[in-house]
């Protein structure tokens, strides 16, 4: 039977192991993260869950985000490419269908791709009062998502657009930063005109 001191040491080792594991995962995507995130106190790192692709499961970050969509009553996203990949796109469509308010802010090139690839569904979503799509020419390289009880950061490979990591956390200081970032881009974002993207 462990003493109270032994239990405290064991708990400390678990915390250290968790921090080291998170640091190892973050190191792989550090260069994609906004500077502000890299400046957060190190104790916030252990509160981050990092989902990386694996050789046998390359869509792990996308699948993880799809599961988070099933648990939220709020979706606001800067650079939401992860939300527009299968199976997230179907989950997002279902959420909009149930009346959930969704706002996505992305680059014109991304809107052009999805209107061209999914014209019928894109138009159907765009007509919903609870779905807002905005565009902005200068967005961060990392996606920033505001869900009901957590913040997500999605890291994209710039050439292919593939999702390299999904980071999630409920740390208040990161939520505050993400809300501020979202608001700073939303204020200058423009409504999307679907006719500009559909021939």
Image (cartoon, helix red, strand yellow):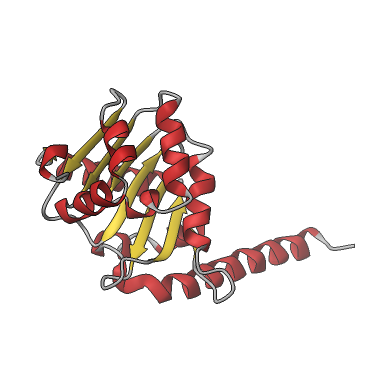
In this figure, what is the number of numbered marks? 0
**Quadrant showing the C terminus:** top left
Q: Position of residue 2 (x, y in %)?
A: 85, 63
Is residue 124 in sight in this rendering?
Answer: yes
Image quadrant assignment for residue 17: bottom right
The relative height of residue 123 versus residue 138 in the rendered view (above or below) is above
Query: Looking at the image, which is closer to me, 31 or 194?
Result: 194
**Quadrant showing the N terminus:** bottom right
Q: Position of residue 21 (x, y in %)?
A: 55, 71
Image quadrant assignment for residue 196: top left
Residue furthest to the front in view is 199
Residue furthest to the right in view is 1
Residue displayed at 24% across by 62% down: 141
Query: Looking at the image, which is closer to me, 184 or 137?
Result: 137
Image quadrant assignment for residue 20: bottom right
Is residue 48 in sight in this rendering?
Answer: no
The relative height of residue 186 versus residue 88 in the rendered view (above or below) is above
Q: Is residue 14 left or right of residue 94?
A: right
The relative height of residue 172 versus residue 153 in the rendered view (above or below) is above
The relative height of residue 176 versus residue 63 in the rendered view (above or below) is above
Q: Position of residue 124 (x, y in %)?
A: 31, 32
Query: Looking at the image, which is closer to me, 154 or 168?
Result: 154
Q: Position of residue 12 (x, y in %)?
A: 64, 64
């Amino acid at each position: 039977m462990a003493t109270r001191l032994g239990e405290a040491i064991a708990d400390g080792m678990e915390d250290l192991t968790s921090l080291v594991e998170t640091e190892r995962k973050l190191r792989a995507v550090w260069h994609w993260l906004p500077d502000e995130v890299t400046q957060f106190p190190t104790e916030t790192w252990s509160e981050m869950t990092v989902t990386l692709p694996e050789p046998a499961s390359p869509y792990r970050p996308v699948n993880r985000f799809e599961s988070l969509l099933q648990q939220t009553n709020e979706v606001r996203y800067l650079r939401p490419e992860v939300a527009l990949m299968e199976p997230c796109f179907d989950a997002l469509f279902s959420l909009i269908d149930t009346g959930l308010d969704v706002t996505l802010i992305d680059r014109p090139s991304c809107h052009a791709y999805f209107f061209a690839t999914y014209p019928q569904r894109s138009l159907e979503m765009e007509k919903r009062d609870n779905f807002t799509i905005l565009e902005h020419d200068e967005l961060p390289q990392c996606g920033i998502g505001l869900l009901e009880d957590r913040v997500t950061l999605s890291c994209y490979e710039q050439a292919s657009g593939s999702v390299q990591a999904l980071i999630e956390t409920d740390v208040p200081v990161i939520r505050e930063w993400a809300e501020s970032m979202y608001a700073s881009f939303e204020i200058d974002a423009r409504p999307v005109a679907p006719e500009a993207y559909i021939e």
